C-alpha cells in the first residue's frame, strides 16, 4: 500500500474499542492505494503420484488508477521509504500498473458495452437504435455555421470523383458539436461511417466503405472496445474471479496479519457501505466466507518462540528482526522441523512454485503470499497430527489479528462471524474436520487418516 497509518491515528494506548480501531483502519484504507496485489493459488498436483504435492501458482499485480479516476494517489513518506529500501519498483507501478474499478463501476461499464455492441452486425445496430426522437436543435449562430460548413465539406468530398481516399478527417469540435455531426451524417449520408480519429480525440472522421468493409471494420472496432473494457476493469476481474471461487466452493483465503489487506481490498473493489465494523464483517461473509490469518495461527502455535529474542544454537536471535517476511520464514522452517520430528501421518508433502516467486524477495506481494500459503499448509498438517506436538487451525476460522495488547485479557482478534472481537483464548467450535472444501481431510471419529484431498482443493493466499 502507499500507506497504512494516518499520522494522527497511529498512536494508541491499546485501550481503544473494536469500532474505534476499525474506524482508524478504515480511514487509512480510504486514503491510500494498493501498490501490489500478490496472489498464490495452491492446487493439488497429479493424484496418481501417490504424494501430497501442491503446485503454487504465484501472481504479482501492480495496481495504478487510470487517468479518469477521481481518487488521488496519496503517499505516506514512512511507507515509501520502507518500500524503497525493499526494492519496490515505483517506475513499473506508475508506468505499467493495471487499472481497477469497484463492482458498481464494472457493472456500469459492462452494461454500456452491451448497449453499444450487443447486436451481431452493424446493420442490426442501426435498426436497434432507430430514428432519434430527440434531434438536437442548434441555436447559437456559430454552431449553426460550423455544422453547415462541415456537412458541405462532406458533400463535396462525396461528389469529388478525383478523390481516391475513402476517409475524410473533419475539423476539431467539442463534444456537443461532435454529437450533432454523428446525428446529421447518419441522417443525410446513411452509407457513411463516422468514427473518432485515432490521432485527436476532438476530431471525427467519415469513411466511405462497401458493406463488407463496414462489417469487417465494425467487428474490429467491437473487439477493440472489448479489449478496452477489460483494460478499464483491470484487476477487478481478478478479484471477481477469486470471490466467485471462494463463495461457490468454500475455498479458504489465507492472509498474514490480514486486517488491512482485507480492508484495502474491499474499499478498492466493493462500492457497498463499509463505515461500520458490522458492515465490513457482513461484506466479508459475502466476498470471502472463509479466512485464516497465519498471524493468529502463529500466536496460538507459540508466540514467544517466533517474536521473542529466543537464541539459536549459535547464540544469536533466531529472528534477526521482526519484519513480516522474516517471521514467516522462521515460522515455516520451524513448522517443517516440527513435522519431521512428529508422528504425523501426512508424509511426502512438497510445495512447488510455478512462476518463480519462491525465494528471497521479501515484501514482493507474490512472494509474501507464497510464504503465507506455505505456513497455512503446515498448520493444516497439524490438524491431523498425533501427540502433544499437535497444533493447527482449530478455532481460528475467520479470526483476523487485531493488534498487540498490553494485557492478554483484552481483545486481540477480529471475529468476522460474530461481528465482535474475541479474546486471545477462543471458544469457537472445533473446526478440525476442515469444513471448507479447500484442503479437506477425512476423519473417522478422533482417529486421523491419511490427509488425501477428496476433491479439487484450492487454497488462495493473498498479500
Image (tube, rainbow, N blue to C red):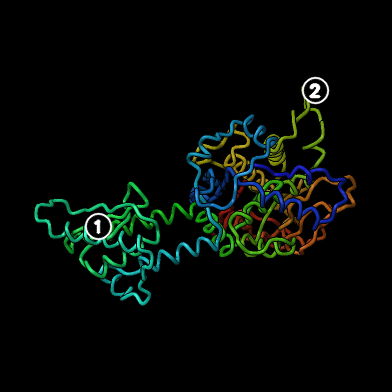
Q: How far from the left and from the top, in percent, is residue 384?
A: 69, 52
What residue did someone put label 1 on?
206
Residue under the image location 70 percent in, 35 percent down:
78
Can residue 107 be seen in this snapshot? yes
- The image quarter containing residue 154 is bottom left
Frontmost residue, 395 versus 423? 423
> Which percent across, then down, holds residue 60?
53, 43
Front residue of 261 and 226: 226
Residue furthest to the front: 141
Q: Is 195 left, or right, of 52 in this rendering?
A: left
Where the C terminus falls, by quadrant?
A: top right
Crowding at mark 2 (Cα within 10 Å: few <14, some 14-19, many 20+)? few
Q: Secondary structure at mark 2?
A: loop
Hey, which residue is sitting farthest left in the picture? 161
Is disc 1 in contact with disc 2, using a CB cutoff of under 8 Å?
A: no
Residue at left 53%, top 39%? 93
Sequence-wise first label, 1 or 2: 1
Q: Is residue 224 left or right of residue 298?
A: left
For label 2, the residue is: 315
The spot of residue 199 in percent (x, y) is: 33, 46
Task: Determine the secondary structure under disc 1.
Answer: strand
Instruction: State which quadrant residue 122 falls in.
Output: bottom left
Q: As rendered, which of 224 and 300 lies closer to the eye?
A: 224
Amino acid at each position: 500500500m502507499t500507506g497504512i497509518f494516518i499520522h494522527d491515528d497511529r498512536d494508541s494506548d491499546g485501550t481503544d474499542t473494536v469500532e474505534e480501531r476499525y474506524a482508524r483502519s478504515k480511514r487509512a484504507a480510504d486514503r491510500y492505494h494498493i501498490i501490489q496485489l500478490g496472489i498464490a493459488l495452491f492446487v493439488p498436483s497429479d493424484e496418481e503420484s501417490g504424494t501430497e504435492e501442491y503446485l503454487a501458482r504465484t501472481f504479482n499485480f501492480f495496481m495504478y488508477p487510470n487517468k479518469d479516476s477521481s481518487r488521488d494517489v496519496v503517499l505516506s513518506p514512512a511507507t515509501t521509504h520502507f518500500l524503497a529500501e525493499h526494492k519496490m519498483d515505483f517506475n513499473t507501478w506508475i508506468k505499467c500498473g493495471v487499472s481497477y474499478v469497484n463492482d458498481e463501476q464494472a457493472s456500469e461499464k459492462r452494461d454500456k458495452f452491451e448497449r453499444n455492441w450487443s447486436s451481431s452486425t452493424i446493420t442490426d445496430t442501426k435498426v436497434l437504435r432507430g430514428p432519434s426522437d430527440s434531434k438536437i436543435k442548434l441555436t447559437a449562430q456559430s454552431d449553426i455555421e460550423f455544422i453547415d460548413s462541415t456537412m458541405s465539406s462532406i458533400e463535396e468530398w462525396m461528389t469529388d470523383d478525383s478523390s481516391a481516399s475513402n476517409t475524410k478527417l473533419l475539423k476539431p469540435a467539442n463534444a456537443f458539436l461532435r454529437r450533432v455531426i454523428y446525428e446529421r451524417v447518419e441522417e443525410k449520408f446513411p452509407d457513411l461511417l463516422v468514427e473518432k480519429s485515432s490521432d485527436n480525440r476532438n476530431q471525427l472522421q467519415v469513411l466511405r466503405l462497401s458493406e463488407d468493409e463496414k462489417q469487417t471494420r465494425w467487428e474490429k472496432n467491437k473487439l477493440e472496445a472489448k479489449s478496452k473494457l477489460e483494460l478499464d476493469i483491470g484487476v477487478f476481474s481478478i478479484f471477481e474471479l477469486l470471490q466467485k471461487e471462494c463463495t461457490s466452493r468454500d475455498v479458504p483465503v489465507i492472509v498474514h496479519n490480514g486486517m488491512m489487506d482485507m480492508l484495502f481490498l474491499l474499499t478498492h473493489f466493493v462500492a457497498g457501505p463499509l463505515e461500520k465494523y458490522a458492515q465490513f464483517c457482513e461484506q466479508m461473509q459475502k466476498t470471502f466466507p472463509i479466512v485464516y490469518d497465519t498471524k493468529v495461527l502463529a500466536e496460538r502455535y507459540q508466540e514467544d518462540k517466533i517474536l521473542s529474542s529466543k537464541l539459536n544454537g549459535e547464540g544469536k536471535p533466531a529472528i534477526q528482526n521482526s519484519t513480516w517476511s522474516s517471521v514467516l520464514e522462521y515460522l515455516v522452517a520451524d513448522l517443517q522441523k516440527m513435522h519431521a520430528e512428529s508422528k504425523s501421518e501426512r508424509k511426502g508433502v512438497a510445495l512447488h512454485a510455478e512462476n518463480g516467486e519462491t525465494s528471497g524477495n521479501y515484501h514482493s506481494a507474490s512472494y509474501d503470499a507464497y510464504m503465507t500459503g506455505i505456513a497455512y499448509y503446515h498448520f493444516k498438517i497439524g490438524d491431523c497430527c498425533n501427540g502433544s506436538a499437535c497444533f493447527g487451525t482449530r478455532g481460528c476460522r475467520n479470526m483476523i489479528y487485531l493488534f498487540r495488547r498490553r494485557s492478554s485479557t483484552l481483545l486481540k482478534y477480529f471475529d468476522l462471524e460474530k461481528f465482535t472481537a474475541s479474546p486471545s483464548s477462543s471458544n469457537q467450535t472445533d473446526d478440525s474436520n476442515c469444513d471448507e472444501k479447500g484442503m479437506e481431510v477425512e476423519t473417522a471419529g478422533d482417529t486421523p487418516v491419511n490427509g488425501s484431498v477428496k476433491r479439487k482443493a484450492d487454497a488462495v493466499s493473498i498479500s
